[in-house]
Amino acid sequence: MIIKIAMLVAFFAVMLYIGFTCRKNSTDINGFVLGGRSVGPWVTAFAYGTSYFSAVIFVGYAGQFGWKYGIAATWVGIGNALIGSLMAWRVLGRRTRIMTQHLDSATMPQFFSARFGGNSLKIAAAIITFIFLIPYTASLYNGLSRLFGMAFDIDYSVCVIAMAVLTGIYVIAGGYMATAINDFIQGIIMIFGIIAVIVSVLNSQGGFMASLEGLARISDESVSTAPGIFASFFGPDPINLLAVVILTSLGTWGLPQMVQKFYAIHSEKAISKGTVVSTVFAFIVAGGCYFLGGFGRLFSDKVDLAAGGYDSIIPTMLAGLPSILIAVVVILVLSASMSTLSSLVLTSSSTLTLDLLKDHVVKNLNEKKQLIIMRLLIVVFVAISVVIAIVQYKQNVTFIAQLMGVSWGALAGAFLAPFLYGLYWKGTTKAAVWANFVFSTVVMLLNMFIRPSFPPMLQSPINAGAFCMVAGLVIVPVVSLFTKKPDKKHIDFVFSCYDKTVTVHQTSSLSDDEEEMVS
């Protein structure tokens, strides 16, 4: 117990120290929200990865999908690495950085306003962001309750409040830069932690091959009659598994707190390095989480799904580990949750201040007042998320995957297609963006309130969210073809950022003559 407490105190002390050290970087809007657009590749990549993977992934999704799909759940982690990290950086990173700086936009709603014209889109996007980030924020705490209870026998409410207060302090003090640097440290903890946990859990079952053989002997006729299905390549339900891959991988392309990482990156080289670092990080952390969850059924004699739901699977798998490893796991999940929480509350407060309150509710809002309001809103958002988390836990309203599925589905469904087409296609119209906003938010709200009325395949929030994302990729171009074309002068201005001539050193680019000689 002394070791566990000492590790926690050291962890919190470092987080707070970084927060107060970074105060000098958060004296203006650009610094507080974007770190001055000067964040390097390693810090940005880790900030992206740690915002991506939280306790929702480690405890909720890994447990649930590992139980449902067996070792095939690892495909979700692979999809997160290849689609959610590698492709996201390659497709969005560079263009997002260039166009958002050109349009002087610090948030996704500001981008929609500057790219497509008018304040109405900005207000709508800000409202969608505010509404659907809150349940996602609340879901972050759930994974901690069982782990803290297992390790310290501390009441869930105390865990939630302590984590929220500490996260709020360093975000309020240091803004984006404090969040990013803390994410880097937390990311390192996550990498080493997940590797240590996987090795220890598999060793407790006799090693990897013995664990795989044990999994192959498990059958569940309610899921599949095929022998060894939970140790198979695609598992018992590849269609629904694909929906999980789409939601958790493609979804990052439209999440404001994820895309905003590209706004702040420093340079071209930083994007190239960040792509590699982020992808490797996702392979280890996401791949490791889902791989570990795939062996959950080996512990079926100890797991009580009726009482604890899917969220109890991973904590049960870890309960027999040595005390020092349990402490590492607690800090691992704490790191994952705090990094994501800090990103979400910073995104929510900046969006509400810059996109809703400024010029619409409060006139003549200078920069100093904007910073004060943002910091106050961080307190408000943290408090709201704490209340929802505690009420949800006490009342047993739902479990982690449902909260996250609704949030990701609505946000990514509404924003992914307009943002992607907005970066690449001049023909994207304002009407198409509106159509996609309305479609995705209505579908996910209906899914939340009248779920039984949906077709069987879309009753799951995960499947409904994946459907909204894919549908948006069709809705935006189709509606754009039949609605009023954007103003040519405005579009030429928006895309002129890609036409600027940039001089680079010889070491970065070969001349045409030299390229011919090399070939």
Image (tube, rainbow, N blue to C red):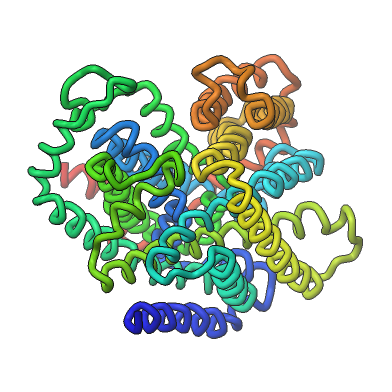
Which residue is at the front of the view, 274 or 317?
A: 317
Image: 121 above or below 288: above
Q: Quadrant of residue 461?
A: top right
Percent position of residue 506, x then y: 30, 61
Image: 152 above or below 349: below
Relative horizontal placement of residue 26, taking residue 259 as reference (left or right): right
Percent position of residue 437, x then y: 69, 31
Is residue 381 visible in this depiction of the protein?
yes
Q: Quadrant of the C terminus?
A: top left
Residue drawn where x is 27% and y is 25% of the image: 220
Image: 497 above or below 41: above
Percent position of residue 377, x then y: 74, 64
Is residue 90 visible in this depiction of the protein?
no
* Number of marks in picture: 0
Residue drawn where x is 75% and y is 45% of the image: 127
Relative horizontal placement of residue 11, taking residue 112 as reference (left or right): left
Q: Quadrant of residue 413?
A: top right
Percent position of residue 494, x then y: 65, 42
Residue drawn where x is 34% and y is 63% of the image: 190
Relative horizontal placement of residue 141, taking residue 276 as reference (left or right): right
Q: Quadrant of the N terminus?
A: bottom left
Which residue is at the front of the view, 519 or 225?
A: 225
